[in-house]
Image (cartoon, rainbow, N blue to C red):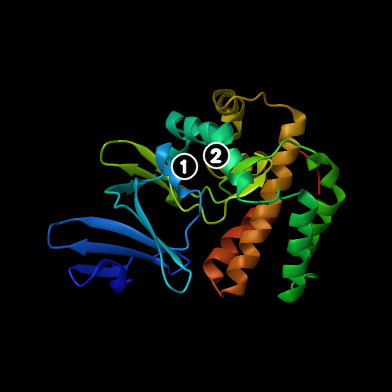
Amino acid sequence: MEQVLGSDWLITPAGGSSGEAYLAENNNQQKLFLKRNSSPFLAILSAEGIVPKLVWTKRLADGDVITAQKWLEGRVLTKSEMKQDDVVQLISKIHHSSEILHLFMRMGKKPLEPWHLLVNLHEKARKLRVSNIDFVKQSTDFLSNNIDFVENYKKVVCHADLNHSNWMLGEDNHLYLIDWDNAVLADPAMDLSMLLYQYISRSEWEEWLKRYGVQLDDHLLARCQWYKTAQSLSFYLWHLERGDEHECAKWKEQLTSNQQLFIKY
């Protein structure tokens, strides 16, 4: 990273799961957020005000691409703030943006079909030798038996990791959604399920979804349950592979609590 900016800049790791994010500072109090090989459609997300402003992009001799964004002074949203109207409006804007969708498709991204997601989960569980653990098998059986509920739905660009820590409120009170590395073309229920199950009380779902722009019905409830189960299992396996016992326990609880079920296991 030093060769990109020069000796006038101090570059330090900025955290994150990839280990490829950095904070760059110089003597003029300028700050940049640098990332290696971030999402190629960062430019349109920046233009739409969804992520902090993109300052420049540079390709290195080894083929890697470095992006520099304005360093965001602000804070992450709390869990209780996730039900606020600006969160609903931003995720609705993303899901309904034809510009973001068309650019994503022009990048050659293929839609993530439910069966593909299920196959990946089966393969990862077998690789980690947990396929026959009761709650893992129960989850994959549920996904297999109910895949008809989620087939043939219109795809949108989904962020796919809507944890509250990825929602940043700037000092100017502008809300941003960061970390687009896992974005996919998928059923919007993939994103909606994790927001609803983690942050919105069941009694508020109908009103929340009305503000988002859809009507709550049994089909949407079933799709949200399916994707909630699939993503919870995906996150469990991801953290299991990395030996993070605390996060594994969190996602195991999501899979075994059986709260707010609309299709019975």
Q: Where is residue 139 in the image (x, y as percent from the top left)?
A: 76, 57
Q: Where is residue 23 in the image (x, y as percent from the top left)?
A: 29, 63
Q: How far apart are marks 1 and 2 (CA)?
A: 7 Å
Q: How crowded is mark 1: few (under 14 residues within 10 Å), some or many (20 or more)?
A: some
Q: Position of residue 130 (x, y in %)?
A: 74, 72
Q: Which residue occupies 46% across, 42% down?
A: 44
Local secondary structure at mark 1: helix
Q: Which residue occupies 58% across, 35% down?
A: 95
Q: Is residue 51 above or below residue 237?
A: above
| Left or right: residue 149 compared with residue 258 | right
Amino acid at the residue labelled 1: Ile
Mark 1 and mark 2 residues within 8 Å of each other at the beta carbon: yes
Q: Is residue 262 above or below residue 251?
A: above
Judging depth in this view, the residue of 54 and 227 nearest the camera is 54
Q: Quadrant of residue 225?
A: top right
**Residue 100, disc:** 2
| Left or right: residue 35 compared with residue 201 | left
